[in-house]
């Protein structure tokens, strides 16, 4: 049996809209105004997102971001700081009474991440899920994922790196010594990889969207109906971007 | 006494934050930050509130109790790790304050 899902093949948006749209989709899906949804999107301008429980100034070099026109936004989800540059981001939104949401939280990370692992398989890349929330290839991280469950809905979003500028990433993100565990910064940098490195060729945004669509469909047994976001979802996303996700109150909480 | 704490233990994410202790070494106020997950997210504020009045040696028990009390689930953070990180940070302070019991 396959599950009916809505597929949104989205384009590049700013950080605040992207987070606003993910929350707008969560609202729509939990209110059963739409089918469970997979959205594939990107970021323009480049952005840093931080986890729900992080302190923005501890994690991000704000002046460095500002000088480069890079936005910083707090996510609804936990997890770590992410530099969003050359990547495809997915968000999958499911009502909590859906069979795909019936697993424990830790199990559901493993289940939903199979979509990305299957997508990588289509590119002849063998990857594995590493608890709590990472996908690793040849010992290096290629995808980070984060989930929240709110008022009857599950939202998981995550990244698939097309290419990575580790020097810029580590210029923008502050890596605590405790996380480096005595390793030199170069070793920490070498723990991240991307599709262009693994394949020896560039992978376009569109190609990555296609393999992710196929990967999620096969791994989770989804039957997609491709649609644009509804007008009310777009309006809600812009409203949330303007009033919530770009606010200092939200982004600078937990300091 | 106010100090920061940060650490990463086996099976946890990075746990950091700021804590203020009373003169007798109990937690007056604590804010916990990091790249862990707690579901629902707003349970962390309840957990932090529940740790007020606790000695550092009782943090693990109070954390677990508060988590259970609000029906929350944590990934990448637990009371035992938080307690150890807090105690390590406390003992690394220069000030001769004593930990409360």
Image (spheres, rainbow, N blue to C red):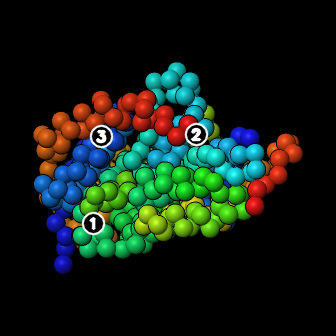
At x 31% / y 73%, what residue is drawn?
A: A102
Query: In the rendered image, which quarter is residue A15 located in?
Result: top left
| Residue A68 locus on image (x, y percent) | 50, 24
Do the residues indicated by labels 2 and 1 lie within the same chain of the protein? Answer: yes
Q: Which residue is mark 3?
A: A20
> Which badge, 3 or 2, is on the more N-terminal residue?
3
- Answer left or right for A42 relative to A230: right
Which chain's residue wears label 1? A
Cα separation between marks 3 and 2: 22 Å
Is A255 drawn above or below residue A9 in the view shown?
above
Which chain's residue wears label 3? A
* Secondary element at image label 1: loop
Q: Which residue is mark 2?
A: A59
At x 63% / y 54%, what residue is drawn?
A: B53
The label on residue A96 is 1
Cα separation between marks 2 and 1: 32 Å
> Which badge, 3 or 1, is on the more N-terminal residue?
3
Cα separation between marks 3 and 1: 20 Å
Who is closer to the viewer here, B77 or A190? B77
- Answer left or right for A84 relative to A243: right
> Which badge, 2 or 1, is on the more N-terminal residue?
2
Which residue occupies the extreme bottom position in the image?
A1
| Residue A29 locus on image (x, y percent) | 20, 56
Q: Nearer the viewer, mark 3 or mark 1?
A: 1
């Amino acid at each position: 049996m396959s599950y009916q899902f809505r597929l949104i093949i989205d384009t590049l948006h700013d950080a605040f809209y992207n987070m606003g749209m993910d929350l707008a989709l969560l609202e729509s899906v939990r209110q059963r105004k739409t089918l469970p949804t997979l959205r594939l999107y990107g970021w323009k301008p480049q952005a840093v997102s931080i986890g729900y429980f992080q302190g923005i100034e501890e994690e991000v070099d704000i002046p460095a971001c500002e000088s480069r026109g890079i936005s910083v936004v707090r996510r609804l989800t936990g997890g770590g700081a992410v530099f969003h540059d050359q990547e495809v981001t997915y968000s999958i939104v499911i009502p909590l009474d859906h069979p795909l949401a019936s697993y424990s939280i830790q199990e559901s990370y493993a289940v939903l991440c199979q979509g990305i692992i299957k997508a990588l398989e289509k590119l002849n890349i063998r990857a594995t899920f590493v608890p709590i929330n990472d996908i690793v290839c040849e010992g290096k991280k290629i995808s980070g994922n984060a989930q929240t469950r709110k008022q009857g809905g599950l939202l998981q979003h995550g990244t698939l790196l097309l290419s990575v500028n580790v020097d810029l990433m580590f210029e923008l993100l502050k890596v605590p010594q405790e996380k480096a565990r005595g390793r030199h910064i170069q070793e920490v940098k070498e723990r991240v990889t991307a599709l262009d490195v693994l394949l020896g060729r560039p992978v376009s945004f569109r190609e990555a969207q296609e393999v992710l669509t196929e990967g999620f469909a096969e791994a989770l047994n989804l039957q997609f109906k491709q649609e644009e976001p509804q007008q009310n979802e777009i309006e809600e996303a812009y409203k949330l971007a303007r009033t919530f996700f770009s606010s200092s109150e939200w982004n600078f909480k937990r300091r | 006494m106010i100090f920061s704490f940060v650490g990463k233990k086996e099976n946890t994410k990075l746990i950091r934050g700021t804590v203020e202790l009373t003169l007798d070494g109990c937690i007056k106020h604590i804010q916990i930050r990091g790249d862990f997950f707690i579901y629902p997210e707003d349970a962390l504020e309840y957990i932090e509130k529940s740790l007020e009045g606790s000695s550092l040696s009782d943090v693990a028990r109070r954390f677990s109790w508060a988590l259970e009390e609000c029906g929350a689930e944590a990934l990448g953070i637990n009371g035992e790790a938080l307690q150890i990180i807090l105690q390590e940070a406390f003992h690394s302070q220069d000030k001769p304050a004593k930990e409360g019991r």
